Each structure stands twice: as C-alpha cells, then as structure tokens.
Image (spheres, coloured by chain):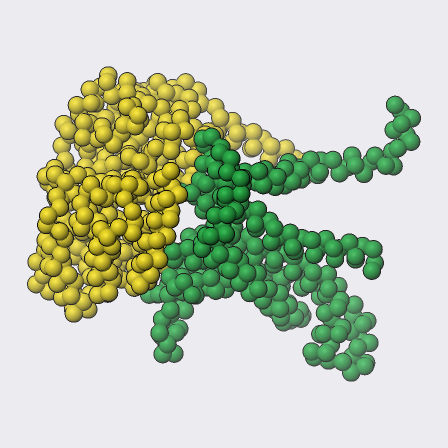
Chain colours: A yellow, B green
C-alpha cells in the first residue's frame, strides 16, 4: 500500500513538472484543429517550422473543437501556452479587453504584413493595435448534390424564387431539400446570417449584431418571414435539433437530402464519406432582395500570443513564419481553405477556386459569423431562438421579444 | 504545558483527529458556499472588474423563463429518479438467489453503474436516434410513428431521465443486495411459521430490515437527481432550445460555457440550487439526529 502511494506521488510530481517547466527553446501551441484536415495542416506547419528553426522544440496540445471554446479561458489565465488559435473580430474582444492577448504590431511591421495581410487587418485590430496573425479563411454558401440536381433537371438557383422552386422539385422527387444539424446551435446562426444579409444587407446585419438595431424591427421580421417560407414548406430535415453538424452530413451523403448551408470545411468530410467532385457542388447563397449589395460570410481563423506566454520571442518567430506567403499556400492547400496572404496562391481545388472567385468579387462586405460578430451572450440567445424558430415557427413574436430583452441587457 | 495536555487529552484528541477533515471541508465546501453567495451579488465575467449589482441577479432570475424551465425539470428529475429505488429493490430480490452463475448475472446487472455516464449518454443517444435508433425501429415495427425523443421539447427530459435510471437502478440494486445479505434468516423462518409469504413477507418482515439500505438509496438518488449534468451535456447540450436544462446545467452554461461567463448570474442559480438542496439536507440531518438519540 505504502509502495503504491509512493509511486503515485512520483507520477503526480512528474506530471506537474511536465505541466509547468518550459525551458528556453520550447514553444507550446494549443489549438482546436482536431478534424483530420486541420490536424494534418498543423502537423505540416509545425514540422516546417522546426526544420527551419532546429533549436526550437514545438509542443503541440490538440483540443477537441467544442471543448476548446471553454478551456481557452482557463489556460489563458492559469497555464498559458505560447500560442493559441482563436478567431478574428468581436470573438477575441473579451480576451483583448481582459489583457490576455499580446499585441503583435511589431510582428506585422517587421514582416511587411500590413501589405501582405491587408485584407484582414481590420478584423484583427482592436483599439488601434493588432492582436494576432490570421492564417486562413473560408467561404460559406450552399453545398449541394450535383448529381441529384441533374437527375431532377434543376439548374443552380440564383434567386429566391428559383431556390424555392428547386426545393419543391426535390421534395416531389422524395429528397429533403436542405440538411442541417442544430444541436450545437451555430449552424442555425449561419442560416440566419445569410438570410439577413440577403434580405437587409451587410450594414443592417452588422448594426443588428452590434446591438444598434432592435430585434423586433420589421426588417428582422422580413428575414424571419423568408425563413418561415422554408420551414413551412418542409425544406429542412426532420429532427435537426438532435444532430450535430457532422451527423447531419449523413443524409446528404446517402442522397436523402440535397443541400447544406455550410462553410467550406464540410467538403473534406463529404469527400471522405465517398462523394466525388461530380456529385458535390457549391453555389452562392441565392439573391433574395436584388437591391441590397451582395455580402458574404467568410470567417477568419487566427493565431495569438497569450500575455502570460513564457516564450514570446519564439512565438513571434512562429507567427512570422505562419504569415509567409509560401507557408500560407501550403497549409491552406491541406486545410482546403483560402490563404490570407495576398501573395499566396489559392489551391486548384474547385471549391477553393469557386470561393476565391466569389469572395474577391464581393462588394457588399464580408461578415465573420453570427457568433463572432455578436457578443457571446447575444449570440447564444440568438442561435437558441433560431433553433426554436425552426421547430416552432409560430413562436416568432415571443422569440424576437426575448432577443430584444437580451439585447437591452447585453449592450449597455 | 505538559500538564495542560495531560489534563485535556480526552477533550483535545477528537479535534486533532478531525482537524484535517474539517480543514478540507472548510476550504472546499463551506468557504466556497459563502463565496458563491457573495459573487451572486456582482456582475462579473470572470476576467475583468467585478461590479456590485445588489440583488439584480436574483430579480433577473425571477423573470427568466429558462430558469423556470430548469426548475421544472429539476422537480421532474427528483420525482422520476426515485423510480430507481423500487426498480433496484425488484432486481435485487430477483437476483438474491443461489443458482449456478448468479455472480455473472449480478455483475451484468451492475455493469451500467460501472461504465461512465458519458458512455451511457452516448448509448442512449443512439438508442433514441430518429433514423437508426432501436427505439424507433421498435415503434415502427408495432405500427407507431417514430419519436425524436431528444429533439422534442416534451419528451426530451423524460428521455434523459430514462437513461439516468439505468445506472441508478444498478446502484440501488447493489445497495439492496448488500442489505439482503444482512437480513436475519431466523426472522424469515419465524414469519414462515406464521404463514407469511409474498408481498406481506416483503412489506412487514424484509423491508423493515432493509431500512438502512433504503435510506442510503434515497440519499444517493436525490443527490444524483440534483446533480444530473453529464447526461444532459452529452445527450442534448441542454437543447432543443434549452428545454432539457436543469439548474446545475443552467448554472454551468451561464458561468462557464462558451457563450456564458456571467459568474454572478451563475452563482445566483447555484444559490437557488443550494436552497433546494438545503430542504433535503435539513430533513436528513434531522432524521439522523433523531436516530442517534434513539427516538
């Protein structure tokens, strides 16, 4: 017994030592890139960095996607890594305000990033300082089963009427038009973003997520009325509240559903599940109100230095490496996403090319995502409301009033 | 000094032995309770400055529908979770026999308590899956409409409680099995001579002897119902739109989850939860006090 207790303390001591000692030349990186493609991209990235900097040893802690969002708070305050990935825009505001992220203006200045990453400078800047380095972004839109569309003679819909007509044709053929899994809520946020961007435009959408417009406004109601048309017509798969976004891929793979309003990261698992490029296609979310300038959604992923990091010098080296054109080209090829660096080349994957073409011709503005543009509390209440609305559309008034109540409390 | 120790040895020794326990209990239970009480009077995101808001968090709770949904679900949990006690007793009586291989059967029935709640949650999520879940295949086989238990606001709480009853029944079963070992065979014999059998035997002779087991089973079941968290988190994440939350989960969501970090509001929910638990705790303490005095 005593022997066992002794070896137990030895193990405990060993693990605490592992957790706290970070000798010079060791760089600790925490990321939530646990899906296969992002994981591989980071493996390649870290290997490349280590090859160029043989004196630096990188320790990489991989978190699962949903859990990371909670644990980042703990490790930023308690046991900070030297680098952590996060998101641009309002989403990093709480950490910037709490002084948990380190400004990296010097990395930007020394490496000419103000030119090469110019497109993302705005979303990385808070209070006149730059708080991280963006390394990838990706388009949202409608991913669809090309073969099912072709079998039913449906052309790619470009406006709202065509979109609804396409859905009706699919339903008549026994295919549910759109799949979605709202268990973790954010997928419904993406749908709202697009419906609102297309109905009311970028400026109103941003004002709404910033808390400057009321949720009971008639313009919000117009967005929801468009959404209700899809709900009433039975366009969404049944029981979506029981599925995560990955589980909702299954009906599309099996051919029971034909479309998915999603980000480009859905392509990798869809391909892995056996869909070929002849079966899978992408189109821009259809135009609803032709009078509003076309805006898109393209969330940016970023890497930051926590203020409590132990090895900031090497962390800055890593950021400079990450910002380089050739590195961004390489990792985004693996990620299946778009590089931020303007001198990088976009992979010749057809979805990437489509997204790149769409985003570079967007003149109406680029939104990050509902839960990155709106503050956390508003985002949570909003997305929960959207989920409820998709199941019980008759509760719309109640939901909007509740959201208005949250808005009044959150933005003081 | 030495004589003081000699004189008071009898009085001091118990306190010295209790000291480590009291210290731990104070640091990890008593002090945090008062900290919660104080945090619940502030608006605080856990990172920045605390702002004193008085009873504003509680006032907001009074007007928060999500809070009432959680409270209602907590009551449902408390009531239905109690089913684990008779169910456990039934299984224990059934398994309390000597046939070949009974130990294997006992371990099989105990199995759900051994595996992690997370695994139980996953198993039941698949069981309830509207497309390929066993439940809906069964329902369709007898000509009923499939139910998406975990996506339906009316069914979801009952669905999760059913999943929770599975391991909890096993727990109560093991408590009763141990209790049944201690049942006095002479009393059974005497009751037999008086022609007692079946339910009467159970009610008047066996159950009174199982009273300690029943007491423990009730305590662990009530505590289990009030801290039901992992199953909800795994099976629904509180959804659909918050209709399967209980107070413990709502507190976690407000204070620690991705979109939460309202420490003050979370603490206020924790205080309400504590108040509910206090009802039970007081009742149990009172009962134990009476038992000790032999009343």
Please state which of residues A411 and B141 is positioned toward the viewer in this rendering: A411
Screen quadrant of the N terminus of chain B: top right
Q: On screen, A179 above or below B203? A: above
Relative side of A341 to B211, left or right: left
Quadrant location of residue B29?
Answer: top right
Relative side of A143 to A19, left or right: left
Task: Give the image location of residue A344, x and y in percent.
Answer: 15, 30
Q: On screen, B39 above or below A129? A: below
Residue drawn 43% across the image and 58% down it: B243
Please state which of residues B20 and A321 is positioned toward the viewer in this rendering: B20
Residue drawn 51% across the image and 35% down it: B52
Q: On screen, B83 above or below A207? A: below
Task: Give the image location of residue A236, x and y in percent.
Answer: 25, 61
Quadrant location of residue B15?
Answer: top right
Task: Give the image location of residue A340, x and y in percent.
Answer: 19, 32
Relative side of B86 to B287, left or right: left
Residue A268 visible from this viewpoint: no
Please state which of residues A68 and A158 is positioned toward the viewer in this rendering: A158
Please state which of residues A299 and B193 is positioned toward the viewer in this rendering: A299
Screen quadrant of the C terminus of chain B: bottom right
Residue drawn 71% across the image and 74% down it: B202
Relative side of A307 to A344, left or right: right
Task: Give the image location of residue A3, x and y in percent.
Answer: 65, 35
Residue drawn 49% across the image and 49% down it: B61
**Extreme-bottom residue of the structure:** B195
Residue A331 visible from this viewpoint: yes
Number of dots carrying numbers: 0
């Amino acid at each position: 017994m005593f022997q066992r207790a002794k070896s137990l303390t030895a193990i405990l001591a060993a693990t605490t030592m592992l957790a706290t000692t970070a000798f010079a030349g060791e760089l600790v990186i925490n990321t939530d890139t646990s899906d296969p493609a992002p994981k591989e991209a980071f493996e390649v990235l870290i290997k490349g960095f280590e090859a160029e900097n043989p004196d630096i040893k990188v320790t990489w802690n991989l978190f699962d996607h949903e859990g990371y969002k909670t644990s980042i708070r703990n490790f930023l305050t308690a046991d900070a890594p030297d680098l952590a990935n996060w998101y641009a825009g309002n989403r990093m505001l709480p950490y910037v305000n709490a002084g948990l992220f380190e400004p990296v203006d010097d990395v930007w200045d020394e490496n000419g990033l103000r030119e090469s990453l110019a497109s993302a400078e705005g979303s990385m800047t808070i209070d006149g300082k730059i708080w991280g380095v963006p390394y990838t972004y990706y388009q949202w839109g409608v991913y669809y089963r090309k073969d099912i569309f072709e079998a039913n003679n449906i052309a790619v819909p470009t406006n709202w009427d065509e979109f609804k007509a396409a859905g009706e044709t699919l339903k008549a053929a026994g295919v549910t038009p759109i799949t979605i899994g709202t268990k973790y809520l954010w997928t419904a946020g993406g749908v709202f973003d697009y419906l609102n961007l297309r109905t009311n435009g970028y400026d109103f959408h941003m004002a709404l997520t910033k808390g400057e417009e009321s949720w009971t406004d008639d313009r919000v109601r117009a967005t929801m009325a468009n959404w209700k048309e899809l709900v009433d017509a039975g366009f969404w798969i049944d029981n979506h509240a029981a599925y995560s976004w990955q589980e909702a891929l299954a009906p599309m793979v099996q051919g029971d559903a034909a479309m998915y309003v999603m980000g480009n990261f859905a392509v990798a698992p869809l391909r892995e599940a056996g869909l070929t490029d002849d079966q899978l296609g992408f189109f821009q979310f259809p135009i609803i109100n032709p009078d509003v300038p076309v805006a898109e959604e393209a969330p940016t992923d970023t890497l930051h230095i926590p203020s409590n990091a132990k090895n900031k010098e090497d962390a800055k080296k890593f950021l400079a490496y990450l910002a380089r054109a050739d590195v961004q080209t390489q990792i985004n090829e693996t990620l299946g996403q778009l590089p931020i660096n303007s001198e990088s080349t976009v992979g010749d994957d057809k979805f990437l090319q489509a997204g790149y073409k769409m985003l570079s011709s967007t003149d109406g503005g680029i939104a990050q995502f509902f839960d990155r543009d709106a503050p956390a509390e508003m985002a949570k209440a909003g997305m929960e409301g959207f989920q409820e609305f998709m199941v019980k559309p008759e509760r719309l008034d109640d939901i909007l009033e509740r959201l208005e109540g949250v808005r009044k409390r959150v933005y003081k | 000094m030495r004589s003081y120790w000699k004189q008071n040895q009898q009085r001091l020794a118990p306190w010295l032995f209790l000291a480590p326990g009291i210290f731990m209990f104070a640091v990890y239970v008593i002090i945090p309770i008062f900290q919660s009480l104080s945090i619940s009077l502030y608006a605080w995101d856990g990172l920045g400055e605390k702002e004193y808001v008085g009873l504003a968090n509680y006032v907001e709770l009074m007007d928060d529908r999500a809070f009432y949904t959680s409270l209602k679900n907590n009551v449902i949990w408390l009531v239905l979770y109690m089913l684990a006690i008779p169910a456990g007793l039934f299984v224990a009586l059934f398994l309390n026999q000597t046939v070949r291989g009974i130990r294997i059967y006992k371990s099989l029935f105990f199995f759900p308590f051994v595996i992690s709640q997370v695994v139980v949650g996953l198993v039941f999520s698949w069981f309830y899956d509207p497309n390929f879940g066993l439940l809906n295949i069964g329902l369709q086989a007898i000509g009923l409409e499939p139910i998406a238990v975990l996506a339906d606001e009316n069914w979801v709480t009952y669905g999760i409680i059913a999943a929770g009853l599975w391991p909890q029944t096993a727990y109560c079963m093991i408590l009763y099995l141990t209790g049944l070992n201690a049942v006095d065979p002479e009393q059974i014999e005497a009751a037999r001579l008086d022609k007692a059998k079946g339910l009467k035997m159970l009610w008047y002779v066996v159950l009174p002897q199982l009273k300690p087991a029943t007491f423990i089973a009730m305590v662990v079941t009530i505590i289990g119902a009030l801290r039901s968290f992992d199953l909800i988190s795994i099976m629904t994440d509180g959804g659909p739109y918050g209709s399967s939350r209980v107070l413990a989960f709502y507190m976690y969501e407000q204070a620690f989850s991705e979109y939460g970090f309202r420490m003050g509001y979370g603490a206020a929910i924790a205080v309400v939860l504590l108040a509910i638990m206090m009802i039970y705790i007081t009742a149990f303490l009172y009962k134990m006090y009476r038992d000790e005095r032999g009343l």
